[in-house]
Amino acid sequence: MTTYSFAGCLQNSQRINWRLDEVLGDRDFDPRKRWLPQALSGADAVRCLDDDEKRKLTHVEMAAYAHLFGYVEEFIAPKIAELACDHRESDRTAFHALTSFAAEEVKHMTLFRLLRDRIDAKMGFGLQLVGDAEGTATYVLGKSPGAVLLLTACIEWFTQRHYRECFVEDATLDPFVRHVFKMHWLEESQHARMDHLETLRVFTASDDAERDRAVDDLIDLVAAVDGLLQMQAGFDVDNLSRYLGREFDQRAREEILASVLRAKRHTFLASGVTHPRFQELFLEVTTPAQQERVGAALGALLAGDAATV
Ligand SMILES: [Fe+2]
Ligand SMILES: [Fe+2]
């Protein structure tokens, strides 16, 4: 079993912590490059687009990718701030580490908002992106803490995987994009570990009925995430059409939509739930029957993708 400590996370967090102006500066996107790694993009699988159009699809997909991080951080930050208070009197180090975690997520929200402005300016129009992040955060925060923490763990671990396995490896990628997600990854490394510790704490303090409710809630949250991905995939097609100044016929639209949605489900669900550290955590806090229920729900969404948890 992997062990982490709040003291170690706090030490790393204080060493790494960066300022927004250091990350953004006067850096800019290069539209001649791809903006999202091949492994996270649906562009290459689309046959009705030429190479130039595929590259532009990665621009649209990266805008959505960055936006969705800021979107989920709207519920991660308040949940972690709330959990931090549980340690206020008993463990100052955990209190400090978790409040720093929450503060970093708030900073990341600002990072992705500022990035969105630069993307819109570069592409020449305001991209359509899923809205009502506050309403979604309220919905998620109404679910049981164990469910929110498991969903958050999935997100934190796929952030690790994406940078280390996809952003680093793709030589065709825009350097500014790689830089932003490197800096995000550096701070997220501590979040993944602290989320692991808090998930264990919350599940240990729960009774059987509460754990079962957390699993039901997790299944609801996964369905809600998929609903957002479906909506954003549709917006991506609209954004691409506007970016290219080209109307798609129904067949082309359906082909692009299917490929973009497949890539988003891989990116935001499959690559998280199959991460070894997430699997280790999930197996530790759930029973085989609960694992089967979550596996069935994911399997229905990720047909053809790796959905084993
Ligand atoms: Fe973040
Ligand atoms: Fe995070």
Image (cartoon, rainbow, N blue to C red):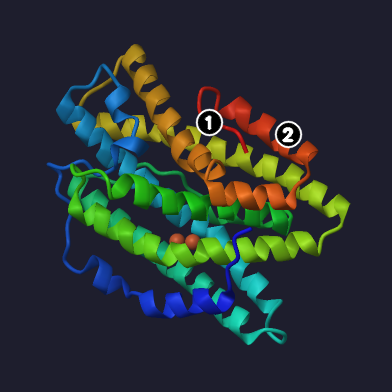
Q: Quadrant of residue 206?
A: bottom right
Q: Quadrant of residue 141?
A: bottom right
How far from the left and from the top, in percent, is residue 67? Answer: 40, 50
Asked if residue 176 shows in the view, the reply is yes
> Front-most of 124 and 220?
220
Cβ at disc 1 under 8 Å from ligand 2: no
Three-letter amino acid code at disc 1? Ala
Q: CA distance from mark 1 to mark 2?
A: 15 Å
> Front-most of 193 and 266?
193
Within 10 Å of disc 1 (Cα), the crowding (few <14, some 14-19, many 20+) is: some
Cβ at disc 2 under 8 Å from ligand 2: no
Q: Quadrant of the N terminus?
A: bottom right
How far from the left and from the top, in percent, is residue 208? Answer: 87, 52
> Front-most of 253 and 270?
270
Q: Quadrant of the C terminus?
A: top right
- Checking the image for residue 292, the label placed there is 2
Name the residue: 75% across, 42% down.
216
SS type, badge 1: loop
How far from the left and from the top, in percent, is residue 181? Answer: 33, 56
Q: Disc 1 designates what residue?
A: 306
SS type, badge 2: helix
Q: Quadrant of residue 19?
A: bottom left
Name the residue: 19% across, 53% down.
175
> Front-most of 251 and 8?
8
- Checking the image for residue 31, the label placed there is none
Asked if residue 243 shows in the view, the reply is no
How far from the left and from the top, in percent, is residue 156? Answer: 50, 55
Name the residue: 61% across, 46% down.
279
Three-letter amino acid code at disc 2? Glu
**Is 239 above or below relative to 94?**
above
Label 1 with label 2: CB-CB less than 8 Å: no
Of labels 1 and 2, earlier in sequence is 2
